[in-house]
């Protein structure tokens, strides 16, 4: 992606460009760990989900979990990436208290998934392509607990050996917005595939963010890595701070040291933790306890044939099939649950009254707006897809107006019930009797001769007349009939 003025940061010595790459660690959706049969369930008591393999007891050998392999291949296919039919597990050697073996089983030169691509949507309808360098499988480390004892740090091995997919992007991103959009899109793809739940609060998805700066056209600068980011908003803040920190150092005559840093969300700044290791520091070598991982092209083709419809495909279908705008379709497909809800709304509508645009408007503006206001997820919506479908159906039939529909939505939200039955029981039907509407129009015209005298010079006053008629009918008059009658009687 070429640099543009909107992507540059103003410095005292000129313009600067950010170069951003991400390493996203996604916990594989599986019931057991990568190399043992221990449970991956979240929230167990410390050290309750641990096998002898996870604890690195002498003589315990790893055995590959086929489901984790399947999930990694499916993820690679969802990222439009090359699947390597032969891959190798390596030992990544380093010492840390939460790494019982003294090494991590990972993949280095021969990963399970090669190069791919993710298309991200940006503000203003723009898109950007972010290259995927690789996806490899590796085991997670344990968790150090520093607040359980006044004099010691404790280790919880529950997470030790849990399968991770490390998805490494190319350094293609140039703004914090692109980085946020990339993580958002990646999380959406993983959730559609069912290969990771994407829960950043539980640590199922976390990112290491690599940031460097350069003046446009110059070689890549020295990068710093911000570790273990578990919030998309914080990723954006950390990138902005880190880029400006590096620019300040360089413009003051300093040199950027390659190092690992952490982000402090309370202070909004990054801080150094240690110098950054290079690959050769880890002394990678093939794990002698694991044979190379090999599978056939037929295995890959079968997994490809059974992939679900992914966000980009679903968005294109919503646009072509239901006539939605790119923006509305993008909102609906951002999360699989939202897209499924919308499709269920449509499936509940009567065939002759089906209106994809109207349904999308009600799902996005009324339902999503209310859910956001109440802090609820769509899975906790008081209004079910069938109920919302019935409301949209009633509007399409002309049984209720948009104003009445909003009142009906509120009743269903608060009390539940069948919308069609509620309309009948509460007398909420729209007035479509032209005779009754004409009488209301005539009464308003007769009562406001001064406004009638102004209408030819100020035709926009018809909106006032419409409002008065709707008010007099309790909002039940058909708005189109009111408009048509007023235009005829006022000579517009």
Image (cartoon, grey):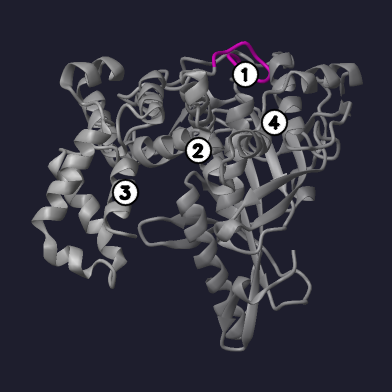
Which residue corresponds to mark 2? 357
Q: How many neighbours does mark 1 have within 10 angstroms: few (below 14), some (14-19), or many (20 or more)? A: many
Instruction: Estimate the spatial distance between the alpha carbons at disc 1 and disc 3, rounded to whole Å.
Output: 66 Å
Q: In the figure, residue 320 lies in which quadrant?
A: top right
Give the residues drawn in magenta, as a range: 30-39
**Mark 1 or mark 2: whose residue is earlier in sequence:** 1
Say which residue appears at 40% left-offset and 55% top-offset.
265
Which residue corresponds to mark 1? 33
SS under mark 2: helix
Residue 302, placed above or below residue 251: above
Frontmost residue, 130 versus 254 = 130
Say which residue appears at 63% left-offset and 58% top-offset.
126
SS under mark 1: loop
Label number found at residue 138: 4
Instruction: Estimate the spatial distance between the alpha carbons at disc 4 and disc 2, rounded to whole Å.
Output: 44 Å
Q: Looking at this view, name the residue that lies furthest to the top.
A: 37
SS under mark 3: helix
Q: How many neighbours does mark 4 have within 10 angstroms: few (below 14), some (14-19), or many (20 or more)? A: many
């Amino acid at each position: 992606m070429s640099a543009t003025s909107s992507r540059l940061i103003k410095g005292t010595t000129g313009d600067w460009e950010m170069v951003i790459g991400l390493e996203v660690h996604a916990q594989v959706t599986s019931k057991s760990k990568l190399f043992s049969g221990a449970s991956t369930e979240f929230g167990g008591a410390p050290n309750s989900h641990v096998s002898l393999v996870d604890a690195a007891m002498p003589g315990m050998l790893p055995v590959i979990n086929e489901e984790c392999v399947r999930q990694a291949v499916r993820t690679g296919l969802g990222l439009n990436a090359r699947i390597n039919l032969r891959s190798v597990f390596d030992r990544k050697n380093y010492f840390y208290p939460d790494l019982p073996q003294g090494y991590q089983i990972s993949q280095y030169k021969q990963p399970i998934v090669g190069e791919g691509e993710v298309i991200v949507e940006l503000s203003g309808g723009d898109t950007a392509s972010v290259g995927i360098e690789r996806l490899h499988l590796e085991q997670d480390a344990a968790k150090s607990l520093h607040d359980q004892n006044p004099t010691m740090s404790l280790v919880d091995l529950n997470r030790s050996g849990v399968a991770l997919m490390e998805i490494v992007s190319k350094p293609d991103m140039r703004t914090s917005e692109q980085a946020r959009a990339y993580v958002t899109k990646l999380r959406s793809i993983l959730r559609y595939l069912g290969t990771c739940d994407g829960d950043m609060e539980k640590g199922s998805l976390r990112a290491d963010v690599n940031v460097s700066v350069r003046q446009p056209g110059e070689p890549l600068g020295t990068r710093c890595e911000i570790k273990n980011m578990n919030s998309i908003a914080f990723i954006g803040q950390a990138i902005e701070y880190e880029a400006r920190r590096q620019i300040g150092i360089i413009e003051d005559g300093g040199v950027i040291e390659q190092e690992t840093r952490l982000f402090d969300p309370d202070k909004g700044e990054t801080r150094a933790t240690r110098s950054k290791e290079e690959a050769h520091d880890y002394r990678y070598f093939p794990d002698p306890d694991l044979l190379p991982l090999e599978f056939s092209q037929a295995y890959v083709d079968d997994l490809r044939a059974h992939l679900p419809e992914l966000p980009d495909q679903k968005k294109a279908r919503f646009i072509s099939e239901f006539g939605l705008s790119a923006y509305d379709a993008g909102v609906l497909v951002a999360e699989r649950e939202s897209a499924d809800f919308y499709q269920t709304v449509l499936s509940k509508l009567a065939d002759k009254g089906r209106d994809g645009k109207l349904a999308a408007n009600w799902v996005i503006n009324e339902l999503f707006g209310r859910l956001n206001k109440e802090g609820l997820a769509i899975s906790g919506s008081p209004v079910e897809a069938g109920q919302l479908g019935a409301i949209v159906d009633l509007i399409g039939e002309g049984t209720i107006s948009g104003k009445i529909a909003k009142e009906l939505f509120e009743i269903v939200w608060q009390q539940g019930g069948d919308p069609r039955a509620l309309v009948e029981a509460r007398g909420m039907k729209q007035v479509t009797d032209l005779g009754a509407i004409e009488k209301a129009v005539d009464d308003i015209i007769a009562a406001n001769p001064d406004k009638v005298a102004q209408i030819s010079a100020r035709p926009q006053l018809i909106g006032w007349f419409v409002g008065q008629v709707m008010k007099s009918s309790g909002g039940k008059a058909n708005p189109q009939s009111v408009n048509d009658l007023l235009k005829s009687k006022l000579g517009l």
